[in-house]
Image: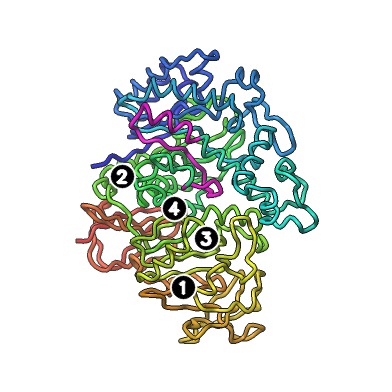
Amino acid sequence: MKKLFIGAAYYPELWDAKEVDKDIERCKALGLNVLRVGEFAWGRMEPKEGEFDFDWLISVVDKLHAAGIHTVMCTPTCTPPRYMLDKYEQMRNVSDRGVRSQTSWRCHPCKTSPIMREKNRAIVTEMAKAFGSHPGIIGWQIDNELYPYGDGCFCPLCVDKFRKFLKHKFGTIDALNTAWGMARWSLDYQSFDAVNPPLPDQWKHPSLVKAWWDFQCDNIRTYVEEQAEILHKYTRAPIGTDMMANNNLSYYDINRSLDVVQFNHYNTAAELYETEFWYDFLRSVKDRPFWVTETQVGWNGSTVADCGYRPVGNCYVNTWLPFAHGADMNMYWLFRAHRNGHELAHGALYNTAGRQYRVSEEVARAVREIESCKDILCGSVKSDIALHYSSTAANTFMAAPMLKNFDYTATVRDKFYKALRHYNVDVIDTEHSLDGYKTVISPFLCHARENGFYERIVKFVENGGTWIVGPMSDIVDENVTKYTDAPHSFLEELVGVYTKYQRPIDSDAFRAEWTDNKQSFGASMCFDAYEVGENSVSLAKYAGGEFDGLTVVAGKYIGKGVVVILGSVPTHSDIKNMVEAEPIFEASDNVSLSRIDGEKSAIIAVELENAEGYIQLDGAYKDRISGETIIGYCEMTPYSVRVLEKI
């Protein structure tokens, strides 16, 4: 049976040996069985250039191992020592205003700098030699929260590498000019050397913005792969990198050379449903359970506390939730509050004086319950429904939202995913396999020609799948350029419709209804109006107004399956009506449900909104946490968890 891990980030370099011994006992008191160490300790590991000292950290890992506490070892490459950054200026990144970073924070190295890469390879190699075979280390974390902060590094090295990136992609400057439409406003480049990154206080060309972002993300990918290649030579422990809650830096791209998906989030008490969305996305990236490497235990903070108060029970639920969605690790930031520095006011499991916070008791309670249910939690979450959440779409809409105040992530999550809270759902990117799904939903999948997606989705439908696509899907290419023969590259032809009108502006002037029963269809956000061909069916039509009688939802049978195109954003109930699946149970909207199947199967129910809720069961179930038998109607108290096995 696999092991489940609950723990925290710990910084032994900040404490003397006696305090480390006390903290190990405090870990055991809460039932924690894993700590993350090393991520910011480069200066202690390499006190002088080329002179490495790991004895102090080996002693800590040895003590943890002897106490039954596992270690996730982190490479410290987001915080090179001050002496190194001061000696080699090019290791520090440059802002979009041309200012070189000071040596005063973290995550500020230039990812292009050959010296930075050389120093990374040296420290990672020495760490791998020292710790690669240590029995106490169950995994590795590369760097910390990698992301193109401030739109990336604008130093001369990065600008030159960006130009080479473009030349490799387009071949000739004429090809770039054509792809980006630079003849407009007489903006044609004469050479790749003339292409500069998008700068502040300018009206930025969307194609340039996205290309710059693509370059920065690709640079991070190679930065990660370089470290992973070294670590894989010395260890069999899984390797990952802790990423934040966005898909602009593609999870699929970054994790392709890694072994385990790692995730950091700091959602407030009221935002747990956002976390649930991310868990259903992370679960699908790799064929193994994901790790939550950071979440706030009480409150976030720097020199002031932030992210709000956690009501009683919220931290308990936050500990449980990833395991309900397929994780096998959940770690808090941090174990013990810092004595000084940039994050002086951040919450923790223990305060600086080594005393528990109230939320620590909730973690200890969750630890006991999760351990008692591990035979169930070692199963897996299988889904019939997939929902697309595309990194390419995230970056395209970042460069050109097209809809006013449009937030791609929030729209996919709140308008589509949230409608399916009582179903098992995989949230996937376009390269993910479609095998095994019955329904695939692709809202705002603006670029649908990548990763062989067109061919694969057609085959999926022909083999009996249901594809619900749109609105605003298949509308631009990878360069944020619209199509000229039709509003879509292939959707009109595939579905057999003609897009007569498009309104990319939200308005309450549009009404629609289902064609078969005349019940209201809740169109919103944007509005496409279709004429259907002879082999297609109008499923919902506009009722009244300028689009009266035209179709807003059309469908067509292709092979054994069906494709449905949406011209607008439906309501939650409309989405559920279109999905070819039944919910796990009927339940109140504040209750999350997931089904885990393995040697033992169970339904895990989590109340997320600090309110009373319910589940309507289909028979008799035993709650593994409370021990009670429940038949039919099942109450959910605020911030409660139930693990329900059918009797």
Highlighted magenta segment, given as a residue range: 224-252
- Is residue 557 a member of the stretch shown in magenta? no
In three-dimensional space, the C-alpha distance between marks 4 and 3, rounded to whole angstroms, equals: 21 Å
- Which residue is under mark 2? 370
- Which mark is drawn over residue 573? 1
The mark that comes first in sequence, 1 or 4, is 4
Q: Position of residue 378 (x, y in %)?
A: 27, 47
In three-dimensional space, the C-alpha distance between marks 3 and 1, rounded to whole angstroms, equals: 30 Å
**Whether residue 126 is visible:** yes
The mark that comes first in sequence, 4 or 3, is 4
Local SS, label 2 = helix
The mark that comes first in sequence, 1 or 2, is 2
Q: Residue at (73%, 32%) from the top-left corner?
A: 99
- Which mark is drawn over residue 281? 4
Q: Position of residue 183 (x, y in %)?
A: 76, 57
Q: Residues within 10 Å of mark 2 (few under 14, many from 20)?
A: many
Q: Residue at (44%, 57%) from the top-left corner?
A: 427
